[in-house]
Every structure is written in structure tokens, then in C-alpha cells.
Amino acid sequence: MNKDVLVRTARAMVAPGKGILAADESAGTIAKRFAAIGVDSTQATRRDYRQLLFRAEEAINRYISGVILFDETIRQTASDGTPLVKYIEAAGAIPGIKVDLGAKPLANFPGETITEGLDGLLERLNDYRRLGARFAKWRAVISVDSDRGIPTDFAIETNAQALARYAALCQNADLVPIVEPEVLMDGEHDLERCGEVTECVLKTVFMRLYEARIFLEGMLLKPNMVVAGKKYPKRASPEEVALSTVRALKNCVPAAIPGVAFLSGGQSDIEATANLDAINRLGGPWALTFSYGRALQTAALNTWSGMPSNVLDAQAAFTHRAHMNALAAQGQWTEMEERVAP
């Protein structure tokens, strides 16, 4: 483990005014998103869309610190034969890779999941580093359903152990691990219940990271914000989300980690930006930034719609959203900024 390399990479990924683009959708996930805009998901269309994002030089250079890739993408070349990883590096961002194999049903625990992918992981990590990756990501999924007694302690514990084992393997391969325990927005739970579950999950995860001897200064956390479930009738204000989220982090997350890069978790574009801004107005001992997928890409994807003639407009839409979230990561976003959208 080269601790100096891990520290430099982790700090660069949470540099002021920058965040992480999550472009690691699986083939199945991106097929659903393409279907919604009437585009067939083929190797060529997936390449065209992702090179559109990575060639948005202003966005990547000014607002994006790192890009999380899928296995297909890290091996893919652009239409001109250039490896897509090289476009990311040339724009000054750091390539990374999603390494988990997805959440699968947890035996004997209906409604709960365990993320798989530990078998052979060290060999895959070494291969990804050879291909240009400098960090990795593993997502654990925690559902909330009080009527069914979910989440159970067993599901939280099992996923926390997997996250710790993954993080240890990453650091031994000199890759910064992004540890992503996501409490899902799906459900009817209120803000308070999300906060309770989030704290329980984070405390368990960091206990297991400690036991696994994880070098905290060389990792990043990618948690959910504390928000009410989608089916709960009242949406919390950004200020309420910020108070609940920062409270959970301060109660559970060591100050030693360089930064927290929030997932958007199904929030709308504007909601994810407004909540991030409110969180940064409170602040904490860590950098507080974004690691968004849909909340960065939706406007660009809809604008593109598979048409080469729309590429420049789609890049402008992506750049605008990246800029808005970069402002929010510094507590400097206002609704007025949204009015200058392309």
C-alpha cells in the first residue's frame, strides 16, 4: 500500500469546487435510460453517449475531479480510436471503476440484498489499474420498510463487512476505495427514520472499516443524503435535509477521511443541487461534494436523444449541471444561477 499515492488521489477527488461524475451504469441500466429517449442500447450508441460526456472539456476540466466507469467503458475507444480513459485524463480528471457485481437477494431475508463481487477482486483491481483506473467504487444497498422490519441488523452487518473487505483490497492495489452504503429513497419513511437508519449503517460500516485496518486518509465515503422516502407525503426543505445529513455524518464519520461525495439517489436535478448547497452552508471537517449520475446526466441525455446534431447542445446541458453542482459544493449556488441555463 502506497499511502502517499492514496492520499494524493483522494484529496484530488474532493478538490474545492469539483465533484465526481458517476458514468458507471450497467448495460441493463443504460438500456432502460436509452429506451426512455427512443435509442437502442448498442456498444456503438453507448460509446457515442459516453464520449459526448468525456469530450465536454469545459465541464470535465473545471468541475469534474473524477469519473466512475463501467467495465465496458474503461476498455472502450472513442470513434477516433482514442481510449475513452485518455479523454478523461487529458481533461485533468481521474478515471475510476465500479467493481461490484450488483446487489443480489439476501438469502432468508426477503426484501434485502447483499452486494456481490469479492471473488477474484484483487486480480480485477490490478487489471483496472493497468487500464488507467486510480480509484474504485462499491455500492451496498439498504432498503427501509418498517412494516417488514427492514433493514435488519444482519443485512447491515453483512454489507458493511463486504465494503470493508473491498476497501482493503483496493488500498492494497493502490486504488482509492469509494465506500458507498446507500439507504434507498424508495418507501414511505419520513426524514427522521431515514436519519436513524443512515446513522446505524454508517456506524456499522466504519466499525468494520476500522477492524479491516483501512487507511482512512486514503478513502472516500459516498453516502445518501438524509431524505424522506419517495412515497412520504411531505418533502423536506433543503435546510431540513442539510441539518439531518450533517448531524448523521458528525455522529458517525471520522474527521480523518478527506471527503464525502454524496449520491443523488433518485432526487431531481434541482433538488440534488439545492440540498448539496444547503449541506455545504453548514459544512463539516470533510470536503462535501457530489458523485452524481442521473442528476448530472439527465438533461444531457434528453437533449442528445441519439442525434449527432444534438451533441453540442447536450454537452452544454451537461456543463451547466456540472457548474451548478460545483457551486453547490462550495455553498455558492442560488436559484438565480439556474436561470442562465443553456
Image: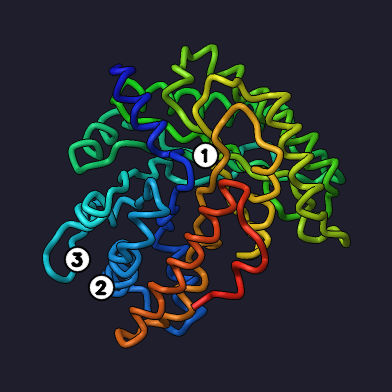
Q: Amino acid at mark 1?
A: Thr
User: SS for tag 1?
Assistant: strand
What crowding class fits label 1: few (fewer than 14 Cα within 10 Å), some (14-19), or many (20 or more)? Answer: many
* Label 3 element class: loop
In the rendered image of this protein, does residue 41 appear above or below residue 108? below
Instruction: Residue at 72%, 27% (x, y): give it.
Output: 153
CA gap, disc 2 to disc 3? 9 Å
Label 1 to label 2: alpha-carbon separation:
29 Å
Residue 56 falls in image quadrant: bottom left
Can you give x and y, in whole percent of width and height, for residue 250 in the image?
A: 70, 26
Q: Earlier in the sequence, mark 1 or mark 2?
A: 2
Q: Quadrant of residue 230?
A: bottom right
Q: Which residue is mark 1?
A: 115
Instruction: Pick the residue in front: 321 or 41.
Output: 321
Distance in Å between CA atoms under marks 3 and 1: 31 Å
Residue identified by numbered label 3: 78
Q: Amino acid at mark 2?
A: Ala
* Residue at x 79% of width, y 51% of height: 228
Residue 342: give x, y in percent of width and height.
49, 78
Q: Nearer the viewer, mark 3 or mark 1?
A: 3
Residue 133 numbered mark, or none: none
Q: Position of residue 1 (x, y in %)?
A: 30, 17
Q: Are marks 3 and 1 in contact (CB under 8 Å)?
A: no
* Residue 304 in sight here: yes
Secondary structure at badge 2 equals helix
Is 328 above or below relative to 117? below
- Identify the residue under disc 2: 44
Residue found at x 38% / y 36%? 12
* Comes first in the chain, label 2 or label 3: 2
In the rendered image, the residue lying farthest to the left is 81
Q: Is residue 25 left or right of residue 144?
A: left
Asked whether, in this view, residue 53 is left or right of residue 144, the answer is: left
